[in-house]
Image (cartoon, rainbow, N blue to C red):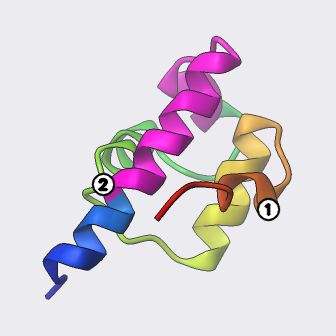
Amino acid sequence: MIRDSQREILIKFGLHVEAIRLGKDLSLREVAKHCDVDYANIKKIEKGQLNMTLLTVLELAKGLGVESSELMKFKI
């Protein structure tokens, strides 16, 4: 079970991912097309509903066209 403090981190990460995606004017489906993550899961990530694995983070970075380190640059 995810604690409230952990849920907050997932939400902040998701908002950061969404900001990157929107900044690149990409749809969820466009991101999914460039990586091995289903668009429905990307939507869940952006809403803080999915605690993903490292491999998912790497795939998401690929789909967004950014370095994986860029995804970790968000305020906790």
Give the structural element (helix, strand or loop) at label 1: helix
28 or 12: nearer the viewer: 12
Element class at badge 2? loop
Q: In the shown orientation, is residue 30 left or right of residue 76?
A: right
Which residues lie in the magenta part?
11-32
Would you call the spot at circle 2 few (<14 residues within 10 Å), some (14-19), or many (20 or more)? Answer: many
Q: Is residue 37 left or right of residue 24?
A: left
Mark 1 or mark 2: whose residue is earlier in sequence:
2
Residue 49, image x, y percentages: 25, 57
| 49 part of magenta stretch | no
Residue 43, x across and y down, in percent: 36, 39
Quadrant where the N terminus lies?
bottom left
Classify residue 64 as left or right of residue 19.
right
31 with respect to 7 (left or right): right
Give the answer, above or below, for where 19 lies relative to 17.
above
Q: Is residue 30 above or below residue 61?
A: above
- At label 1, the amino acid type is Ser
Residue placed farthest to the front in the image?
A: 75
Q: Residues within 10 Å of mark 1 (few under 14, many from 20)?
A: few
Residue at 29% over, 77% down: 6
Residue 73 position within the rendered picture, expressed as x and y whole percent measured from the top left: 68, 56
Distance, label 1 to label 2, CA atoms, is: 19 Å
How many discs appear? 2
* Residue 69 tag number: 1
The quadrant in which residue 69 appears is bottom right
Q: Amino acid at mark 2?
A: Gly
Residue 13 sits inside the magenta stretch:
yes
Q: From the image, give the main secondary structure of the stretch colored magenta.
A: helix
Residue to which mark 2 is pinned: 48
The residue lying at 73 percent from left, 50 percent from top is: 61
Viewer-side residue, 40 vs 7: 7
What residue lies at 76% left-to-right and 52% top-to-bottom?
Answer: 70
